Image: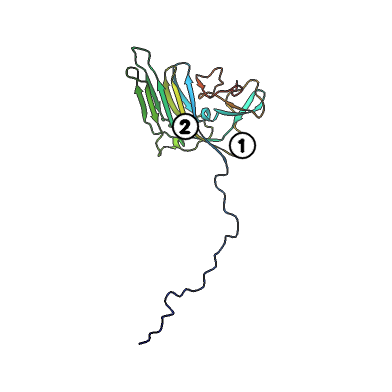
Amino acid sequence: MFRSKNTKKGRRGPKAPRMGISHPLQLDGYQVRHSVKLRFITNGAEDVSITFQNLLDTFLVGTSLTSASDLFNWVKIRHVELWASPALGSAVTVSCSFAGTTTGIMGDGIQHTDTSMGVQPAHLLCRPSRRSLASTYQTNESSVAFNLNVPAGCVVDVALSFMGTFGVANAAQNASVATVVGAIYLRGLDGLAVATTKFVPVALAEGTDAI
């Protein structure tokens, strides 16, 4: 018996035309961004509060012979890491806390501390809680980002994310000496020039310090 082929099976209709967008795609994150781990070595024992302005003052651009401005406008802390070796036959302790209580930049209130044992250095790796505003982008506030209590010779690594915008300049909190206009400089973690800082940047090359 002859059966007719079902011509409807597998039949497809005409393809729908692809709809294109009527304009170019949006652009997000158009600001200047830079993520970096900065390393400092303390030249003395310090019990100090590091502000967000201190963090932004680590990267400067010269604006006149005696002044400089922050290269970036916002900063976010990813983590802080500390190492400190004890003298033979003794112990040494390091501590860090994100305890800022200023409205808008609250820390998580957690105290991180470690003490050396034998020849092993004291070591800390601490991050602000994701629920704390200390872990989000902040401007050049004079409020505390974190507190450090460290001995001389302590290695301090600070992992930061910077973000800048256009047409906005925030002046550094401390004056410079013999600054070249347009040149980029590096300062200590406490916002002071290399000649006076207690947190000396290790990534220094000739001409990178704002004095």
Mark on residue 168?
1
For residue 208, which quarter of the picture?
Answer: top right
Question: Is residue 1 shown above or below 144?
Answer: below
Q: Residue furthest bottom?
A: 1
**Dividing the image into 4 quarters, which one contains the N terminus?**
bottom left
Mark on residue 159?
2
Residue at (49%, 23%) from the top-left corner?
40
Q: Residue furthest front?
A: 1
Among numbered discs 1 and 2, the one appearing first in the sequence? 2
Q: Secondary structure at mark 2?
A: strand
Mark on residue 146?
none
Looking at the picture, which amino acid does disc 2 mark? Answer: Ala
Mark 2: give few (<14), some (14-19) or many (20+) Cα within 10 Å: some
Q: Residue furthest left?
A: 117
**Dividing the image into 4 quarters, which one contains the C terminus?**
top right
For residue 24, which quarter of the picture?
Answer: bottom right
The x, y position of residue 168, in whole percent, is 61, 37
Q: Secondary structure at mark 1?
A: loop
Give the alpha-carbon distance from disc 1 to disc 2, as whole Å: 24 Å
Residue at (35%, 17%) from the top-left corner?
119
Q: Is residue 147 left or right of residue 184?
A: left
For residue 88, which quarter of the picture?
Answer: top left
Mark 1: give few (<14), some (14-19) or many (20+) Cα within 10 Å: few
The x, y position of residue 43, in whole percent, is 48, 16
Looking at the picture, which amino acid does disc 1 mark? Answer: Val
Question: Is residue 119 shown above or below 185?
Answer: above
Q: Are marks 1 and 2 in contact (CB under 8 Å)?
A: no
